[in-house]
Structure formats: structure tokens, C-alpha cells
Amino acid sequence: MRTSPIIEELRERLASRILFLDGAMGTMVQRHALEEADFRGERFANHSGDLKGNNDLLSLTRPDVIRGIHTEFLEAGSDIIETNTFSATRIGMADYSLESIARELNVASAKLAREAVEAVMAKDASRRCYVAGAIGPTNRTASLSPDVNDPAYRAVTFDELVATYREQTEGLIEGGVDILLPETTFDTLNLKAALFAIEQVFEDTGERLPVMVSVTITDASGRTLSGQTTEAFWNSIAHAKPFTVGINCALGAKEMAPYIRELSRITDTFVHCYPNAGLPNPLAETGYDERPVDTAEALRDLADQGLLNVAGGCCGTTPAHLKAIIESLADVKPRVPQARKASLRLSGLEPQEIGDSPGQLAMVGERTNVMGSPKFKKLI
């Protein structure tokens, strides 16, 4: 399998400076105050259900709006922009009875982002920008039950997630993305399904693209929604060898700081961080409490500690936030990834390292046995 030249190109650039993602697509869409008719367009004028709020659909019905948002972030200085595909899967579109257009949405959204990138680079030969295919977590979890009365119930299976992520990945690559970005991970099993699907597509195409993996730490507990700590999460997915790993959403940069610090300590790959603009504030223009300068200062503090390779923004961050972040971090040296000593690192909700100390014995329960448990065999 060949490796995309983008991987080496990004490595070279990250050796000399921090690269910058874009900001919040949803926040920018809200600024346009779009109505139901904008989401429907001519094509979906007679659709049976409401479509307002289906931001991914705007790539087909109001491509001018989405292309314009991409351009605003690029003009603010972003090196990497994300496609408008956070919920563009069959699972995500099922809420609107639009499952059949999932692949089309990904192709169209990737092409829009590519057009915006090419236009900006054509104006300025010194710019080199990239398109990251945004792959959201879906609104279903493979590890948690949505029914408090039936803890064993799951609204989606691993295989169903693999199928929906595979379709999305194929569409994004067909549309011309440079990078794949599974993000806002609140259930690591969902992410594993995405990574499995991505690997299948790489095998089919014969080319490996850079994959950025982003987890969401939900609150001060320091855990994902499904209960993992930062280190347990990394142990769970390190085998996939992502190009970058990092944290986005739920928290502002100040609240993320201890978890970014932990991730930077334990991982041997590049680290990214794209926080919310602080915490929710319904009285603020963006719905979040941080001004551009506040977010920039908080990320500058992380960068000054040598923790970051890629920085950007999530919910509530605008082109003004990105411009401030880029100006603040422009002269900061990037983090230098460090190799880790080889060791057997496992995880459930907590991390577990099996060292090489004489006499150390780790006992594993019989239920975690592919011969003794068909269910466990399926999960493996």
C-alpha cells in the first residue's frame, strides 16, 4: 500500500511550526439566520419532514453559504479546513429520512472545501492548505444503552457503524480530502468502528491518508461519556497509529489543559487541540463566553508548555477567534513527539500497563476469552 505524499509533507511542516485548523461550522451557519426554505432548496421542497437544522444538507441546497464559511476561515489563516460532514452518515441522516443521500453529501461537501482551498491557494502562491474530512460520532453509541431499563440494549451494532463509516469515508475520498478526521469521540467503540472502516477503504484504494483522531472529555471528571480516562482512550486506539491525536469540544482550552498535558506526555505522535470558545453562555453572541483574545491566550499557554502541534477551534469559535489564535501562536515552536518504551498497555475504563518486572503476573478473566465467549470473540 502506498502512503499519501501529504503525510510526509505535513511532517515536514509540523517540524517547524504549529499548523492551524478552522473553527465552528455550526456557529457560522447560525450567523446566516437561515430558514426552512434554505435547507430544502428546490430539490427537497416537497420533503415530508422538517429539514431546518440539518447543516450537512446545506452543502447541496446552499453551497454558497458553506463555501463562504470555508473561505472566511482560510482567509483568517487556517491551514486545514474541515468538511461540512459532521452528521453526514446514514445514521445521522435517518433523523430526516435522507439516508439515501449520505454518500452524495460527503462527495459534495469535500468538493466544496476543495474548491475553497484551491481558490485561496491560487490567490497566494505561498499558502498550502488542506481539506480534512470530518467524521462525527453519530447520535448512537455502541457501548452504552439508551434505555435505562435495559442496560444490555444497544441502538447500533459495531458492524452497522462500520458500514456507515465506510460509506462516508469513500465519499470523502472521492470528493478529494487530504486528511480524515474522526472527531468528538465520546464512545471509543464508535471510533474503533470508524478506524476499522477507514482501514478497509485504504486497502481498497491502495493509498493511506493521514488520519487525525479527536476525543471529547465531557467534563471535570476527565473522562469520555463512555467512561474512559485520557490514557485509557489512547491505549485503546494507539494501534491505529493516527497521524495526530487530540481533544475537541465540550470544554474550553483552560478546562482541557490537564488532559492535553496528559495526552502529550503519553503519546508518541503529534497532538492537536481545538477547544470550544470557553463554556456555554446564552447571552453571548456565539453562545460561548470567550472572546477571541481569551481563547488565543489559553491556547498560547498550552503551546508555550510545548504541548501542541495543531491548534484550532470548536463550538463558538469564529474566524475572529482563529485569527487571534494564529497571531498568538505563530512564533511558538511546536511540540516534539517522543518515542515511548515498548510495553503492553491495555485499557478498560482505566489504563493498565503490563511491565517487564520479574515475577509480575496479570490475571485475565475467563469471560475475556474468544473460545469461551462468542460475544467477546465478536467484539475482538
Image: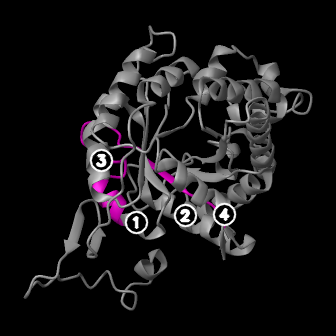
Give the camera-side residue of 206 and 255.
206
For the residues labelled 4 and 3, the Cα–Cα distance comes to 34 Å
Q: Secondary structure at mark 4?
A: loop
Which residue is label 3 attached to? Answer: 223
Q: Report the disc number at residue 238.
A: 1
Q: Type of residue at label 2?
A: Leu
What type is the residue that disc 1 sits on? Ala
Q: Quadrant of residue 302?
A: top left
**Residue where numbered disc 2 is placed:** 195
Tell me which label, 2 or 1, sits earlier in the chain: 2
Q: Which residues are magenta?
A: 208-235
Calculate the distance from the C-alpha at mark 1 to the C-alpha at mark 4: 20 Å
Counting from the top left corner in percent of width and height, residue 370 is at 40, 87
Secondary structure found at label 1: helix
**Residue drawn at 24 percent across, 60 percent down:** 350
Please check the rendered image and state whether residue 226 is part of the magenta-colored stretch, yes or no.
Answer: yes
Q: Residue at x 74, y 29 (%)?
A: 66
Q: Few, some or many C-alpha atoms within 10 Å of disc 4 (few <14, some 14-19, many ≥20)? A: some
Answer above or below: position of 315 versus 265.
Answer: above
Contact (Cβ within 8 Å) of mark 4 with mark 3: no
Front: mark 1 or 4: 4
**Tag in front: 2 or 3:** 2
